[in-house]
Amino acid sequence: MGKITTGELAAPDKKTHSVYRVNVITMGCSKNLVDSEVLLGQLRRGKFEVFHDADGKDFDAVIINTCGFIHDAKQESIDMILNYADAKTRGETGKLYVMGCLSERYRKELEEEIPEVDRYFGKFDIKDLTTELKTVFYPEYIHERVITTPSHYAYLKISEGCNRSCAFCAIPQMTGRYKSVPLENIVKEAGYLSRNGVRELLLIAQDLTNYGIDIYGKNQLTELVDIISGIEDVEWIRLHYLYPSGIPEGLADLIRDNPRVCRYLDIPLQHISDPVLQRMSRKVTRKETETLIRQLRDKIPGVALRTTMMTGFPGETDSDFEELKQFVVESKFERLGVFTYSHEEGTFAAKRLNDDVPDEIKQARADELIEIQRNISLEINRQRVGETYKVIIDRQEGDHFVGRTEFDSPEVDGEVYVSADRELYAGQFYQVKITGADEYDLWGNVLF
């Protein structure tokens, strides 16, 4: 991304800090990105010159916000740390700090293995990091994040942690118990984002479904979404990562009746075979899952359901996988991601279950599911040809403007390539008639 302008804040003063040009690098998920944006906002208010994911190494400090979710993500974070540790040794950059999930989970090991890092911080140590940089932490301005996404959409994190006990997941070890952000704080942050040009808010959490129970004694997700939808200039609200049990009553009705709430739900299911779900400790059955899908589609006509499936969980048999394949064929999810199981240190599965599905079989099963979904996606997209949809423009690419319908989340879903005889603007909404489709993307002509 590069340099982030300081807006109305005073320009950085080299005399104020021993460190004054800071590059924050974000690894992993959108929840990590929000943490980086909060940190950038604090540093900018402290009159630092701030950058995000900037090229080059000529900085007074580099802060790497790491991911510790699965093996590949951990390795990417370690490789990034090593890259900047080498640069620091060569004198190409200044201080090197590491924060986030990986250092929350493995701080002692990292300190021993990569001592070139000046200091390691956990996931929730932003205040300590600002103290290290000799500036002030401003809790009253915690909502004033630096937006690193295209300025018309932003992620809005509504909770930390997770109370679920899924056998394969290490996230609760890093993030702790579920902790909702107070409703008034979320509304304040959403208002700030709206005033700074955000038109699409993507609500995220490890588990949206549990929002509010720890603070208010009851689920408040529907109420939260309803309140946010009333904020001026917010035209789309999108929901990511709902656990498939306990989704609050009334949410489907709100999505159906409120045009500002996208008809889009991201509900990671992981599997459908009851024996696998039981070993995963998902605490949901195939019958309950099928009932949920049917109810959502009955209540929200045209809803796009995104889900995630895992292949190769310990004990997954050929029969289990055949059941999963058939379920995907029958369910025709609008969006589906697949990943292979990996033993994660400290999880119940790693402690108690034998990783008995060979890696090549895990991957072959994943590839097969992806191919099934590719054909489903092509079928669904072809059915959209001739229809007209509201599209938000993200960018221009060659002769086309590129945007998304309400059924597509940025970075993970398909796009619409729009032809127009006039200039279209990022962050603006247009009516687009769909003229073509492939497995993932649509083509169309702007109408007005």
Image (tube, rainbow, N blue to C red):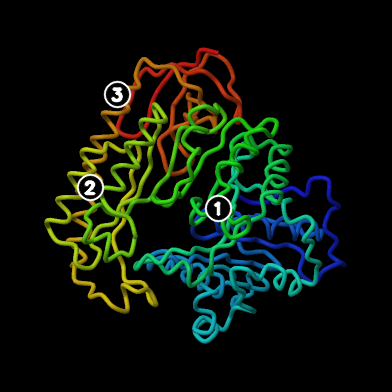
Res. 54 in view = no
Residue 32 lies, in percent from the top left, at 56, 59
Spatial CA distance of label 1 from label 2 is 32 Å
According to the picture, the residue beneath numbered tag 2 turns out to be 369
Q: Residue at image x 59%, y 52%?
A: 157
Identified by mark 2, the residue type is: Leu
Element on which disc 1 rests: loop
Q: Residue at image x 21%, y 41%?
A: 372
Identified by mark 3, the residue type is: Arg
Q: Residue at image x 35%, y 40%?
A: 335
Residue that protrudes farthest toward the left in the picture: 319
Q: Check whether the beta carbons of the residues at disc 3 and disc 1 lie within 8 A of each other.
A: no
According to the picture, the residue beneath numbered tag 1 turns out to be 211
Spatial CA distance of label 2 from label 3 is 20 Å
Q: Quadrant of the C terminus?
A: top right
Tag 3 or tag 2, which sits nearer the N-term?
Answer: 2
Q: Residues within 10 Å of mark 1 (few under 14, many from 20)?
A: many
Please state which of residues 265 and 408 is positioned toward the viewer in this rendering.
265
Please state which of residues 428 and 185 is positioned toward the viewer in this rendering.
185
Q: Which label lies toward us, 3 or 1?
A: 1
Answer left or right for 95 relative to 250. Answer: right
Residue 411 lies, in percent from the top left, at 46, 43
Q: Which label lies toward us, 1 or 2?
A: 1
Res. 243 in view = yes
According to the picture, the residue beneath numbered tag 3 turns out to be 382
Question: Image quarter for residue 179?
Answer: bottom right
As drawn, 240 above or below 347: above
Q: Residues within 10 Å of mark 2 (few under 14, many from 20)?
A: many
Tag 2 or tag 1, which sits nearer the N-term?
Answer: 1
Residue that protrudes farthest toward the front in the picture: 217
